[in-house]
Image (tube, coloured by chain):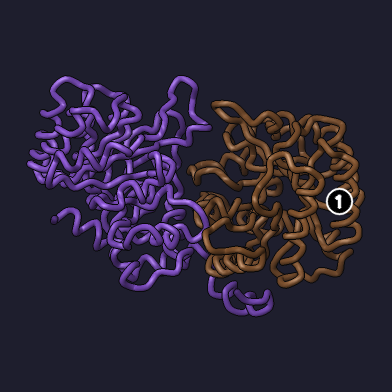
Chain colours: A brown, B purple
Amino acid sequence: MRIWDLHTHFPTSNGLASAEQRAEKLLRCADRMGIERLCLYMGFPWSQDPSPEKFRADNDQVMSVLKKWPDRLLGFVYVNPKHVDPSLAELERCIANGPMVGIKLWVAQHCNTPEVKRIAKRGHELKAVVFQHTWIKAGENYAGESTPMELAELAQGLGGKPIICGHTGGDWEKGIRAIAPVPNVFADLAGSDPVAGYTEMAVRELGAQRIIYGSDASGRSFSSQLAKVHGADIPEAAKRLIFAENLIGLLGPIMREKGIKF
Amino acid sequence: MIPRRDFLLTTLAATASAALALHGEASSTELIDANVWLGRWPIRDLPLAEPAALAAKLNANGVTRAWTSSFDGLMHKDIAGVNARLVESCRAHPIFEPFGLINLTLPRWEADIAECAKHRMRGIRLVPAYHGYKLDDARFVEALKLAASQRLVVQISCVLEDERTQNPLMRAAPVDVSPLAKALKAAPGARVMLLNWLQSMASKPVLLTLADTEVLFDIAMLEGIAGIEGALESISAERLCFGSYAPVFYHEAAKLKLRESELNATQLTAITHENAKRLLFA
């Protein structure tokens, strides 16, 4: 079964200094787990509210390893909607004129805002995959952290173009409910505990064609996240969609345009 | 790592069905799962909540013995009744080894430990975060002593649900294990295993906090890529045990962790069953 991982980051392990060393460790583990391709985003150290200089440096780190493993790694450009014009310029540098194929939006600013909409729309013009982190925390979200409810609001203004709900809100039973009525929202399974029933509920409420496997490695293990699909009581055809086919469907147009074989 | 074309020819073909590979891996060795639960998990209907279904899953994934407690003991006050029903369930499905749940805040909790010994249990399980005490509580030290005198292993389940997703009426912070080393010094002979532990549950990383003790650790909530390899940078393989936290977690998560880290045969044997057996018979 083909497995593409929507959601990975550089390892932060001790002794791994360079981007190349970190990517090599990530790929070595992915090899052991049968994962064919990894979407990689954000550099190191992490910044929740990066300046344009910082997100450009992050993206340079990612692009440096794309060169070495162009057939294993896919880069998403990390931007900050608080700096919308530099962010849009970064889309031109890294996607329109560079090797990247997607956009990563994290926690700098809530996503139901005009700035995020501008970034998402330009991303769609470039055929890029747009990924927005979301969480619903029992305590408090970060100041700029989006919820799946806010993502659903954003998605309704995107003319039906796809957007990915990162982590499905973490509190996935709520997240699935929030995005279910908005058919252009895809659910990312990554980055929460491998709680049994998660994937079954997502398939029941969203349909397998709207769910994408991701790990959030290296903070998470590949194992706990792969188990959400391997261990789910769903048809094999649904597993194929979730593990690779849905993501390939989203990435296919931009990969073909860039001549990336898959 | 390998280029994609070679990857496709080798790794992908070999793992065409990870589920089948899991079964194949499981059949080659003994596997003791130290972290299994029966009973009702209060906040969610679990797909494998029924003992027969869970036993079948564990069997299919190669588990030979599952150390099991009952979630009913989280809230029920008739702990003796909870543990008696657990024994019955385990008798009906011999893959399960009963570990009685003990609530140290109830009157005469000592009698519940004695009852576990009468049931010929091999261990007890504590959930301090849900029963409302800390590990510097005098009752905890007494429980360690009493368990040691009855030759019962003590498991401490440190986290049952991610704090970020808990019901506001059922909040439980991870157990602070900082006092554990001191408690163990006061209870010689106590044999302790941490379940569902996080590195952040002490003032410094948990593995360093307890490095000088003989406490064992399960792998159910061990995260990060190649997490077992990472843990082995701080402790030896003799300190880790296979634990899945099934049926709350997909059982495959723990199984796959054995593959994600590069482990030699000795380390695998230790983690999958030898350490757990050594703990029982120490």
Chain name for mark 1: A
Neighbours of disc 1 within 10 Å: few (<14), some (14-19), many (20+): many
Q: Is mark 1 on a helix, strand or loop?
A: helix
Residue B176 higher or lower than A261, as above or below: above
Q: Where is residue A34 in the image (x, y as percent from the top left)?
A: 57, 67
Q: In the image, what residue occupies the spot 87% across and 31% down?
A: A114
Q: Looking at the picture, how far across and down is residue B188, in whole percent?
A: 12, 45
The quadrant in which residue A176 appears is top right
Going 42% across and 59% down the picture, which residue do you hit? B228
- Residue A230 seen anywhere in this rendered image of the structure: no
Compare residues A23 and B1 and report the one nearer the observer: A23
Q: Can residue B125 be seen in this view?
A: yes
State the quadrant of the C terminus of chain B.
bottom left
Does residue A63 appear to the left or right of B232 in the view shown?
Answer: right
Q: Which residue is drawn at 82% across and 33% down?
A: A156
The amino acid on which the numbered mark 1 sits, given as a three-letter code, is Glu
Closer-to-camera residue (A262/B129): B129
- The residue singled out by tag 1 in the image is A90
Q: In which quarter of the image is residue A207?
A: top right
